[in-house]
Amino acid sequence: ISWCCFQTKSTRYHNILYAQTPAAMVVTVDSSMNETISEEEAALYDRQIRLWGLEAQNRLKHSRILLQGVTPLSAEIAKNLVLAGIASMTIVDDRVATAEDVLNNFLIPHDAIGTTLACASVQRTQTLNPMVKVSATPSFLTDGLTSKLKDYDVIIVTTDSFKEDLSFWEAFDHSVSDSELSSPKPLLILATTLSCWGMAFLNLGNHEFVAEQITSKKLSGPTPTYVKSEENSRTATTFVKTVANYPPLDACLNLRWPSAKSEILPRHVPKGYFVMQVLRRCPSNTSPLTLQHLRSVWKDVAGALSVDESLLTDEDFLCCCGSSSASVNAILGGVVSQEIVRAITGRGAPHGNWYFLNGLQCTTTVEWLPNGAISP
């Protein structure tokens, strides 16, 4: 904004802090968020505040993130969220860092080999943004998990092995849905990548957000031909508070056809969903995965789900074979981070609860499964 060039630095950030946001766009901040953005933070997050507003940045500032699992994918997510200006990030992973971790994860320094992955990743994560509190904690056990999640606003679980950690995912999903947790409950994001394939699942519960609606309006008189403005535009933009009801993980994993709960036809379901069902049934000791093995497992899966085997081709299976792809981790990490920021700030309608990435086809498919309900 050009007028900023003619102001002193202190005056510039004072105007950012006390700028008035249009009433229709304001997202109400929780009463516990008494601390406002400082001038130092306004200077650091200047572009973000102009992009999504002061209220949204304040929500980010008070968000406490739990990151379970140190993987190449979680490194991308951690980087994006710490740079965005969250309050704190607690990293959990008691596995020991190896030379392979150093090569695949930019948050793990070479001299950290032999320490836990959580502790090894703290220093570089903290360097990204000194204003964010970054810490490590011993591995979470599923026993008593509900009480441990009360101190966090967002729970992110990333894994390297989908089959081995699926029960771990379900434990987090059940705990987040537990009635003992006070409202609002933590937002849950589960994500994983395998070679050139990746997926993410979001359970935001009953998620409130402000949706933008553009409607046509009737103009009184001829439309001017000069510079377009809000007054002479043929459309009107309004902001409506809306609720999205996210289904739990169990409801998504146990779809069957034909079924009254499965209103969407199998051919309209993202292929990534069926690839996920194949990976669920692969023995944990099957490494690396081969095309022939995935074909044989898919035959059994297709029969169990009552779907046609032709839904998946060899190309769909090949994306799961091979070494980890840095580009797939970066892309899915960026997409997941963006959705987390949108969820925290309550700005913008959600796109779905499942995200499937195919790196060979360079596509990301988003879908509501089984059926997410969005209501005013």
Image (spheres, rainbow, N blue to C red):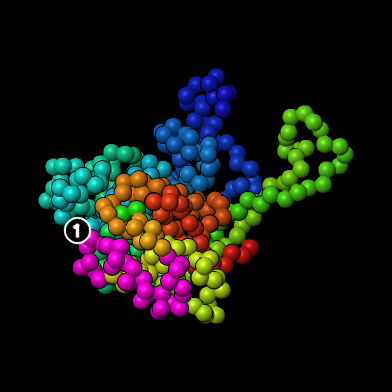
Q: Residue 299: within the magenta? A: yes
- Name the residue located 69 percent from the left edge and 49 percent from the top edge: 214
Does residue 206 appear anywhere in the picture? no
Q: Which residue is mark 1?
A: 94
Q: Residues within 10 Å of mark 1 (few under 14, many from 20)?
A: some
Q: Is residue 132 above or below residue 243?
A: above
- Name the residue located 37 percent from the left edge and 61 percent from the top edge: 314
Label 1 sits on what residue type?
Answer: Asp
Judge by depth and name the residue closer to the eye, 82 or 326. 326
Does residue 271 appear anywhere in the picture? yes
- Name the residue located 51 percent from the left edge and 46 percent from the top edge: 56
For the stretch drawn in magenta, the main secondary structure is helix
- Taking the image as shown, residue 146 lies to the left or right of residue 365, namely left
Q: Is residue 242 above or below residue 236?
A: below
**Quadrant assignment, res 201:** bottom left
Task: Give percent across and percent down for residue 146.
Answer: 34, 69
- Taking the image as shown, residue 86 lies to the left or right of residue 143, namely right
The residue range painted magenta reads 283-312
Q: In which quadrant of the rendered image does the C terminus lie?
A: bottom right
Task: Give percent across and percent down for residue 165.
Answer: 28, 66
Q: Residue 82: within the magenta? A: no
- Taking the image as shown, residue 131 lies to the left or right of residue 307, namely left
**Quadrant assignment, res 126:** top left
Judge by depth and name the residue closer to the eye, 63 or 207. 207
**Quadrant assignment, res 180:** bottom left
Task: Give percent across and percent down for residue 151.
Answer: 35, 60
- Name the residue located 76 percent from the left edge and 43 percent from the top edge: 234
Q: In which quadrant of the rendered image does the N terminus lie?
A: top right
Judge by depth and name the residue closer to the eye, 101 or 341. 101
